[in-house]
């Protein structure tokens, strides 16, 4: 029998007793008040998040990958963050990977028993051909998911870097990682519903890890997404706008260089800023390790 009594995420929230008798206005206000506690809880973990980001950057610089793994909401959030890195930062899907217990079908339907399978976590990483250059981050609101623990233990056994995101202090998964993050947001608005405050905390932390790690490998110029993939009409126009903002060029100039650079935003920016041909700008970027500022 699993003992959940000591988990913050399972405790009843005294401020939301009588939730089923509240007006919509009262419930909305109270939920918003509870959500305010999330960013404060995350702030307490910034030093540890910093270490996770630095380790992730180091992994990327060794051609390693960032791999999230979790079950249920935690797994879905990891998959979401991984998927969004592709269009935002122009990386290959293999560079940031989200694993969810039970596979793709678990994104929409719960797969019975998958999160309790400690062997499955290890097997999913073996299937990815995990290496010591990779960074594995286990995500579990409860902090005790066997699927995650199995994956972390395997990752450590081969020398990969490991981190965790849990929403309980003294989480079990923390014992199985090099860099544990433990965020205590207090009891949920709806008892045990960890898709709420816990899910929000996890999303905030995942945003930090992926975004700042990408900044660390040259995927950002100032505060612009210079490696964005223009996969639709909106992103094509955003790409031109980014070129304008980065170089102070007018729309026509930005559009011309965008096409000349084969719709590569970063390349177009370097061409303009260094007054270079496409070939020379491309070589400058290689020499600069992908950092726009280092090309000048």
Image (cartoon, grey):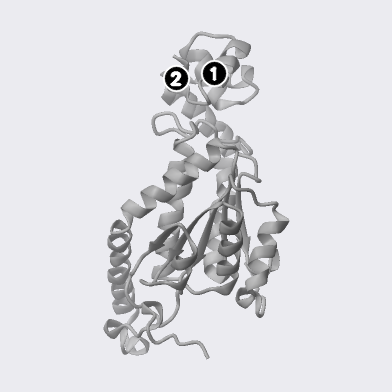
Q: Position of residue 210 (x, y in %)?
A: 48, 47
Secondary structure at numbered mark 1:
helix
- Residue 204, percent across and down? 41, 56
Residue at (33%, 67%) from the top-left corner? 35
Q: Distance of mark 1 from mark 2, alpha carbons?
A: 9 Å
- The label shown at residue 45 is none
Give residue 44's position: percent from left, percent from top: 28, 59
Along the viewing direction, whichever of 263 and 279 lies nearer the viewer: 279
Q: Nearer the viewer, residue 253 or 123?
A: 123
Q: Which residue is mark 1?
A: 287
| Quadrant in the picture for residue 54 | top left
Number of residue marks: 2
* Crowd rating for badge 1 (residues with CA inside 10 Å; few <14, some 14–19, many 20+): few
- Check disc 2 and report the residue beneath it: 294
- CB atoms at circles 1 and 2 under 8 Å apart? yes
Nearer to us in this view, 228 or 219: 219
Is 138 positioned to the left or the right of 30 in the image?
A: right
* Mark 2 crowdedness (10 Å alpha carbons): few <14, some 14-19, many ≥20: few
Q: Is residue 160 above or below residue 71?
A: above
Q: Residue furthest right?
A: 127
Of the residues under marks 1 and 2, which one precedes in the sequence?
1
- Residue visible at 61% across and 54% down in the picture: 158
Please indicate whether residue 184 sits to the left or right of residue 237 in the image.
left
Seen at 41% across and 63% down, the residue is 200
Query: Residue 103, position in %: x, y?
Result: 69, 65
Residue occupying the point 46% across, 42% down: 213
Looking at the rendering, which quadrant does residue 152 occupy?
bottom right
Secondary element under disc 2, as helix, strand or loop, is: helix
Seen in the picture, residue 239 relative to 1 is either above or below; the reply is above
Q: Where does the C terminus fall, quadrant-wise?
A: top left
Q: Is residue 51 left or right of residue 82?
A: left
């Amino acid at each position: 029998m699993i003992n959940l009594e000591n988990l913050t995420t399972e405790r009843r929230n005294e401020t939301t007793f009588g939730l089923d008798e509240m007006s919509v206005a009262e419930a909305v206000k109270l939920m918003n008040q509870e959500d305010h506690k999330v960013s404060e809880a995350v702030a307490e973990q910034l030093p540890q998040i910093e270490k996770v980001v630095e380790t992730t950057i180091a992994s990327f610089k060794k051609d390693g990958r960032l791999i999230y793994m979790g079950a249920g909401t935690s797994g879905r959030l990891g998959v979401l963050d991984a998927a969004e890195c592709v269009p935002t930062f122009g990386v290959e899907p293999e560079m940031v990977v989200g694993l969810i217990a039970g596979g793709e079908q678990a994104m929409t339907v719960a797969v019975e028993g998958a999160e309790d399978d400690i062997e499955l976590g290890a097997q999913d990483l073996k299937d990815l051909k995990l290496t010591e250059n990779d960074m594995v981050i286990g995500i579990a609101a409860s902090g005790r998911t066997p699927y995650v623990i199995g994956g972390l233990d395997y990752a450590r056994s081969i020398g990969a870097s490991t981190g965790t995101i849990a929403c309980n202090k003294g989480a079990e998964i923390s014992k199985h990682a090099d860099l544990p993050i433990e965020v205590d947001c207090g009891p949920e608005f709806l008892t045990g519903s960890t898709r709420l405050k816990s899910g929000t905390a996890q999303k905030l932390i995942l945003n930090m890890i992926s975004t700042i790690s990408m900044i660390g490998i040259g995927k950002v110029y100032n505060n612009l997404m210079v490696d964005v993939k223009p996969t639709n009409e909106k992103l094509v126009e955003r790409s031109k706008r980014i070129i304008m903002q980065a170089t102070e060029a007018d729309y026509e100039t930005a559009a011309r260089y965008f096409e000349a650079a084969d719709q590569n935003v970063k390349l177009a920016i370097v061409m303009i800023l260094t007054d270079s041909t496409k070939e020379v700008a491309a070589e400058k970027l290689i020499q600069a390790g992908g950092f726009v500022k280092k090309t000048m």
